[in-house]
Amino acid sequence: MSDPINAQFRPRIFSGIQPSGGLTLGNYLGALKRFAALQGGEAETIYCIVDLHAITVWQEPEQLRARIREAAAAFMAAGVDPAQSILFNQSQVSAHAEMAWLFNTVARVGWMYRMTQFKDKAGKNSENASLGLLAYPALMAADILTYQATAVPVGEDQKQHLELTRDIAAKFNHDYGVTHFPITEPLIEGVATRVMSLRDGSRKMSKSDPSDASRINLTDDADTIATKIRKARTDADPLPGSMEGLKDRPEAKNLVNIYAALADETPDEVLARFEGQGFGAFKPALAEVAVSALSPITARMSDYMADPAQIDRTLADGADRAAAIALPILERTKEIMGLLRTRN
């Protein structure tokens, strides 16, 4: 149920993706496809390439610039229309960094140390992790609340960070006796919001996995996609008639979910068609669906990447539109906190 506070705010959806290179089928089904589907509805849609998050770990500068453009190309190739949505890269709108500092004074250190993603990324050498990596969730909260976003499409692995965003908004509102920020709601529906590795159904599909066979990249050609699906790990049992029969078969469940998400069907509809059949029949059908869905995206990405200057213009225009929303909200936040505004 939506928080009643949110009724006071314009419906607005915000989400972002890091420009870490090599976007995968998981990024498409878990994020990009959903971003495109949310356009044109009641809520304004704002999508961001979160390059300030990327530099919480060291990045080679030229490679980072290329990856920002690649991510923008993937957004547009997947159907995000810069005319319907605002598409920009985070570092071009300074309000994100300013709001993050304000939130650093609201969030508690203990909240940050409880974030499982910091523990995972910092590992045993947390003393040598960047301060930015620890403060990453406050910047994520700033990304969202700088636009007073009422909803965020997130994967299961980001739910904890969104909970922190809600905590920061609630604490700010309480501390200053205002209703300045919404209590942002997660949008996590979808049959394949968490796409798993093709080699290990217990692990998320990731571009950082050392095995390229574990994932389908958005830049893979049709033959590569078909080969990876053919070699995907499965089991010897036939497919059941419902998802209940796949509860202890993670690799099989993952492939069925992928098919359903690509074909815009429910998993049970897919299983009704393939009940009793083995993966010798299912994998070629999945490969056909995957190639049909992804090949046009790969082609459009290639076209966009061939004109980096146009990508830069698109991002700059999006940044101007984003800043027009963000700056008044930032200035009001400063005013609430008692900071002086001595110039226009």
Image (tube, rainbow, N blue to C red):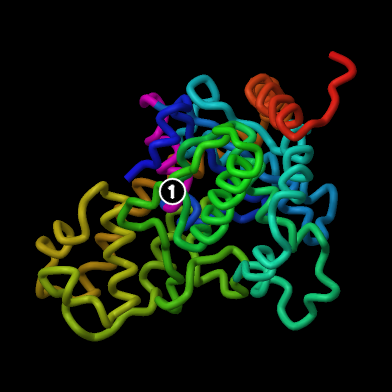
Whether residue 135 sits left or right of residue 270 in the image: it is right
Within the image, what quadrant is residue 70 found in? top right
Q: Position of residue 53 (x, y in %)?
A: 71, 51
Query: Tag 1: Cα neighbours inside 10 Å, few (<14), some, or many (≥20)?
Result: some
Residue 160 vs residue 121, the one in the foreground: 160
Q: Position of residue 243 (x, y in %)?
A: 19, 69
Residue 103 belongs to the span the image colors magenta: no
Q: Which residue is drawn at 16% across and 61% down?
A: 268
Whether residue 289 sits left or right of residue 225 in the image: it is left
Whether residue 252 sits left or right of residue 106 in the image: it is left
Which residue is disc 1 drawn over? Answer: 186
Q: Going by the picture, which residue comes out furthest to the bottom? A: 236
Residue 328 vs residue 121, the one in the foreground: 328
| Magenta residues (range) | 30-42
Locate the C terminus and report the quarter of the image it occupies: top right
Q: Which residue is drawn at 44% across and 79% down?
A: 200
Residue 5 vs residue 248, the one in the foreground: 5
Q: Position of residue 15 (x, y in %)?
A: 54, 42
How many numbered marks have been drawn onto this rendered protein structure?
1
Answer above or below: position of 102 versus 320.
below
| Residue 300 in view (yes/no) | no
Q: Residue at x 82, y 30 (%)?
A: 339
Q: Which residue is drawn at 74% across and 83% down?
A: 124
Answer above or below: position of 14 versus 168.
above
Q: Which amino acid does label 1 sit on?
A: Pro
Q: Is mark 1 on a helix, strand or loop?
A: strand
Q: Going by the picture, which residue comes out furthest to the top? A: 344
Give the overall secondary structure of the magenta segment. helix
Q: Where is residue 37 in the image (x, y as percent from the top left)?
A: 37, 36
Answer above or below: position of 95 versus 34.
above
